[in-house]
Image (tube, rainbow, N blue to C red):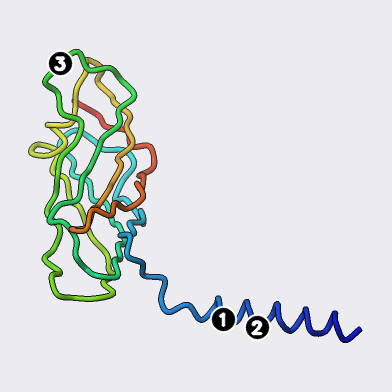
Amino acid sequence: MKLHTFIGLAGLAVMVVAGCKKDGITTKPKLTFKSVSTEHIQFNQDISFILEFSDKEGDFDDTIRVIKEAFTLCPDESFADSVKWRMPDLAGRKNVQGELEIKMSYQQDLGLLICGLDSVQTAIFKFVIKDLAGNVSDTCFSPLITINKQ
């Protein structure tokens, strides 16, 4: 009986210590998809993505990579399926966390990422950040987005 009590208390102590982990901010940058302004983009409508980020050292590279994975083929070999966006300058800060909004203008940003002959395109947007030490975040994904091209 005493052994079972000891094992139960030891297990409880391990859970308490694990629960006291500082704040979950790690050396590897973390990026989490939070929301999108719309999942159905009309012609000439802009879109905005909200992401949460964190990094223990706050040493982000100066860009966040946005990759559009479309479900239609693009016959144009020079078509680029990704763009880079500037990260805020957070140099010198430790245990950095916050929200990041990426606004894409239909004419300036989405127009570069739209290809194919169909009048409607569906795509998922992927987001990745890297820090100066070469640590790369996990890729976070948007829901399926429908883009009307006309």
Farthest residue, direction left: 108
Using the numbered discs, state the Cα–Cα distance from disc 3 to disc 1 in whole angstroms.
Answer: 55 Å
The mark lying in front, picked from 2 and 3, is: 2
* Mark seen at residue 141: none
Q: Which residue is mark 3?
A: 76
Farthest residue, direction bottom: 2
> Which amino acid, mark 2?
Ala
Q: Position of residue 3 (x, y in %)?
A: 85, 82
Question: Which one is nearer the viewer's eye here, 15 or 54?
Answer: 15
- Residue located at (30% from left, 42% from top): 126
> Which amino acid, mark 1?
Val
Farthest residue, direction right: 1
Specify which label sits upstream in the sequence, 2 or 3: 2
Using the numbered discs, state the Cα–Cα distance from disc 2 to disc 1 in whole angstroms.
Answer: 6 Å
- Residue located at (32% from left, 53% from top): 137
Q: Which residue is mark 2?
A: 13
Q: Which residue is mark 1?
A: 17
Quadrant location, the C terminus:
top left
Using the numbered discs, state the Cα–Cα distance from disc 2 to disc 3 in whole angstroms.
Answer: 60 Å
The mark lying in front, picked from 3 and 1, is: 1
- Mark 1 nearby-residue class (10 Å; few <14, some 14–19, many ≥20): few
Q: Position of residue 97 (x, y in %)?
A: 29, 70
Relative to 10, say whether 99 is above or below. above
- Residue located at (19% from left, 61% from top): 60
Is there a contact, CB below 8 Å, between mark 2 and mark 1?
A: yes
Question: Which one is nearer the viewer's eye here, 60 or 126?
Answer: 60
Relative to 136, say whether 2 is above or below. below
Is there a contact, CB below 8 Å, between mark 3 and mark 1?
A: no
- Mark 3 nearby-residue class (10 Å; few <14, some 14–19, many ≥20): few
Specify which label sits upstream in the sequence, 3 or 1: 1
Quadrant location, the N terminus:
bottom right
